[in-house]
Image (cartoon, helix red, strand yellow):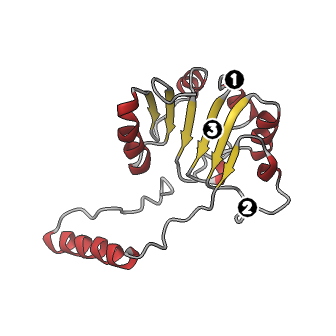
């Protein structure tokens, strides 16, 4: 199966999915994205056409369990489900059932409800499934980059400019 011309739904439109959209551009993918203001009806309609669904969202009351069996079943036969956000976004049992039945073409799962994923968890044995570790750090230059972010924010603070990356506690991220 080719990525060229694929219908891609990006659930969450933060830095990661915006970068992914740019990386998919040369492939001529038709991209539909959903930010924090998504609507059920619009998401359901987009899923029914999707070749690939990529979920990269924080855990909030609005995102917990959003991809239940009903919604995952809206994906066309052989669609690919990708989750790099939070494990709570998907009903893992439903995902396993749809993968085992061959309804979904595959899954790439970087996050799960329980981490690390227990050895006996059925996702490990699902067909066409890749389970990876969720690691956001550990690079050789990680500390230098953290200091650079802190320094840039300190400079913003001194100039009286809005800080970057401020957590909005009402939104949950």
- Residue 124 at x, y percent in the picture: 78, 53
- Residue 144 at x, y percent in the picture: 33, 78
Residue pictured at 27% horizontal, 64% vertical: 163
Mark 3 surroundings: few (<14), some (14-19) or many (≥20) residues within 10 A = many
Residue closest to the eye, 141 or 93: 141
Mark 1 surroundings: few (<14), some (14-19) or many (≥20) residues within 10 A = some
Residue pictured at 41% horizontal, 62% vertical: 167
Residue closest to the eye, 160 or 126: 126
Left or right, 59 with respect to 143, comes to: right
Residue 113 numbered mark, or none: none
- Screen quadrant of the N terminus: top right
Left or right, 71 with respect to 123, comes to: left
Q: How far separated are the C-alphas under marks 1 and 3?
A: 11 Å
Q: Earlier in the sequence, mark 2 or mark 3?
A: 3
In terms of secondary structure, where does tag 1 sit? loop
Q: How far separated are the C-alphas under marks 2 and 1?
A: 28 Å
Instruction: Tell me the residue that label 2 is attached to.
Output: 114
Instruction: Tell me the residue that label 3 is attached to.
Output: 81
Instruction: Tell me the residue that label 1 is attached to.
Output: 77
**Residue 2 vertical position relative to residue 57 in the rendered view, above or below:** above
Left or right, 130 with respect to 9, comes to: right
**Residue 162 vertical position relative to residue 100 in the rendered view, above or below:** below
**Residue 79 vertical position relative to residue 83 in the rendered view, above or below:** above
Q: Earlier in the sequence, mark 2 or mark 1?
A: 1
Left or right, 20 with respect to 144, comes to: right
Query: Which image quarter: residue 31?
Result: top left
Query: Which image quarter: residue 129?
Result: top right
Q: How far separated are the C-alphas under marks 2 and 3?
A: 18 Å
Residue pictured at 54% horizontal, 24% vertical: 46
In terms of secondary structure, where does tag 2 sit? loop
- Residue 18 at x, y percent in the picture: 38, 43
């Amino acid at each position: 199966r080719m990525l060229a011309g694929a219908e891609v739904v990006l659930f969450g439109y933060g830095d990661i999915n915006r970068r992914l959209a740019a990386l998919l551009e040369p492939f001529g993918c038709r991209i539909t994205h959903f930010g924090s203001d998504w609507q059920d009806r619009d998401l359901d309609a987009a899923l029914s056409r999707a070749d690939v669904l990529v979920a990269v969202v924080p855990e909030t009351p609005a995102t917990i369990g959003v991809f239940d069996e009903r919604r995952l079943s809206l994906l066309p036969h052989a669609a690919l489900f990708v989750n790099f956000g939070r494990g709570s976004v998907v009903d893992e049992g439903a995902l396993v059932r749809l993968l085992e039945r061959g309804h979904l073409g595959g899954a790439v799962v970087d996050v799960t409800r329980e981490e690390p994923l227990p050895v006996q968890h059925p996702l490990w044995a699902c067909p066409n499934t890749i389970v990876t570790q969720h690691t956001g750090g550990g690079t050789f230059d990680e500390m230098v980059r953290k200091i650079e972010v802190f320094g840039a924010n300190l400079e913003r603070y001194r100039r009286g400019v809005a800080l970057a990356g401020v957590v909005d506690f009402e939104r949950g991220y």
